[in-house]
Amino acid sequence: MQIAIVGGGIGGLTAAIALQQRGFSVRVYEAAAAWQPVGKGIWLPTNALQALDRLGLSAPLTRRGCALAKIEILDCRDGLLQQVDLRLIAEWLGHTTLSIRRADLHQVLRDHLLPGTCQLDRRCTGFTQDDQHVTIHFADGSKTVADLLIGADGLHSIIRQTLFPGIAVRYSGQTCLRGIASFTLPPPLAHTCQEWWDGKHRFGFSAIDECYVYWFAPILAPAGGNEPLETLQLEKRYAAFPQPVPTLLHHTPSAEIIRTDLYELPPLPRWWQRRVVLLGDAAHAMTPNLGQGGAQAIEDAVVLADYISQLPLFEALPAYEQARRPRVERIARTARLFGQIAHIRSGHLQWLRNRILRLTPAWLSQRQLNWLYRFRE
Ligand SMILES: Cc1cc2nc3c(=O)[nH]c(=O)nc-3n(C[C@H](O)[C@H](O)[C@H](O)COP(=O)(O)OP(=O)(O)OC[C@H]3O[C@@H](n4cnc5c(N)ncnc54)[C@H](O)[C@@H]3O)c2cc1C
């Protein structure tokens, strides 16, 4: 079977590796003219690493990233609200969460593909299909024929728009700034992910190695803002946040800071149609509040490859959707809710939220995370 994957992001590359390991012939068509992973850093949670274990990838990734020991959620006024001990999760499930540069993640994925798998500068513009084949069209006027097309082309997927033209992405009300600071965190924070809240702003960070710290800062703002970064006055906005937040901003060159409006996709009627199937953000883009979008793309890729190798194609695609959809939709709902809770503006509600979070026993929070962090094949 000839398999074409449109999109060489996290999901597309992982799917290509998983399918090649099962003996399929795969081509990845990527629109970008050069590899430039967008997004600075990423957290690969336990479930993503469990799925990557199946492809022999967790060890090379772990060598490049920073294994986190705990996650702390803090309020600028009330201090520590919640703490998750990731070492306990590692004891149960075999992995903690890895904080890593996106460029390193992509490099490791590409290193595990057969030479010549990926073609750059191949922007897909649409496809046609019949009972035998699917024909994929590109912006340069060329086309290619495959037995199966996997749409892994992200949030604004052309494959999804061709399948479901009426479905539009929804703006979350938040835009997110991200950067990498050249800074060494003090020893107590060297393996900690902290996220600070003040109602209007949030700021999260963790080391990606000894000398650099990945940070993200979601703020409430209208979509499409493209004012120069200086106008956002980041250092001023976060001046009242506790250290090391102001220091991290100070140590990040502003040319290196990127801004991304946060969108999510309403549930699709289906994730597949005849010889075309979607995965990752193309199928179920979610807000990044739980750091799970990329992890779910990885889980999709591994599960889809399993079904394709075990069942006839027309059974494999519905089986994949059935296996993945309930989990993905639950995670997307939880991520949306987490974002709303984090950005509560009313002082009274913030007080109430903070009390509830502080009084929630650690064992209960850990147990809730168990379902999130467990990859079910
Ligand atoms: C602020 C922020 C923080 C995040 N943090 C985390 C985190 O910590 N952990 C986590 O797991 N997830 C995180 N995510 C989510 C994660 O980045 C995405 O869910 C993940 O990148 C989705 O992977 P994908 O392969 O589906 O899509 P993408 O990574 O978007 O890849 C799609 C690829 O398709 C290509 N493409 C697009 N259109 C075409 C076309 N027409 N033809 C050919 N190629 C095309 C693109 O160039 C791109 O390379 C975060 C997201 C944001 C916005």
Image: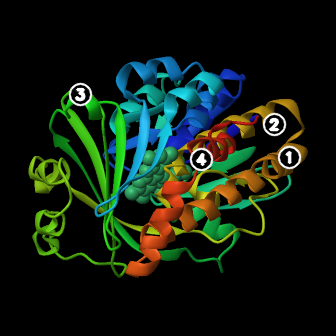
Is 260 situated left or right of 266 in this image? left
Q: Give the spatial CA distance, label 2 vs label 3.
A: 45 Å
Q: Give the spatial CA distance, label 2 vs label 1.
A: 7 Å
* Image height of 269 relative to 153, above or below: below
Instruction: Name the residue tied to disc 2.
Output: 307
Is 292 situated left or right of 197 in this image? right
- For the N terminus, the image quarter is top right
Q: Amino acid at mark 3?
A: Pro
Instruction: Name the residue tied to disc 4.
Output: 365
Tag nearer the camera, 4 or 2: 4
Q: Kindly indicate whether the residue at mark 3 contacts the one at mark 4 (C-beta within 8 angstroms).
A: no
* Disc with the residue nearer the chain's start (4 vs 1): 1
SS category of the residue bearing label 2? helix
* Crowd band around label 1 with a 10 angstrom C-alpha radius: few (<14), some (14–19), many (20+): some
SS category of the residue bearing label 3? helix
* Disc with the residue nearer the chain's start (2 vs 1): 2
Is 267 situated left or right of 366 in this image? right
Instruction: Name the residue tied to disc 3.
Output: 187
Residue drawn where x is 71% and y is 28% of the image: 24
Q: Kindly indicate whether the residue at mark 1 contacts the one at mark 4 (C-beta within 8 angstroms).
A: no
Q: Kindly indicate whether the residue at mark 3 contacts the one at mark 2 (C-beta within 8 angstroms).
A: no
The part of the image, by quadrant, that contains residue 192 is: top left
* Disc with the residue nearer the chain's start (3 vs 1): 3
Is 192 situated left or right of 109 in this image? left
* Image coordinates for residue 216, horizontal then vertical, percent: 31, 54
The part of the image, by quadrant, that contains residue 48 is: top right
* Image height of 220 relative to 46, above or below: below
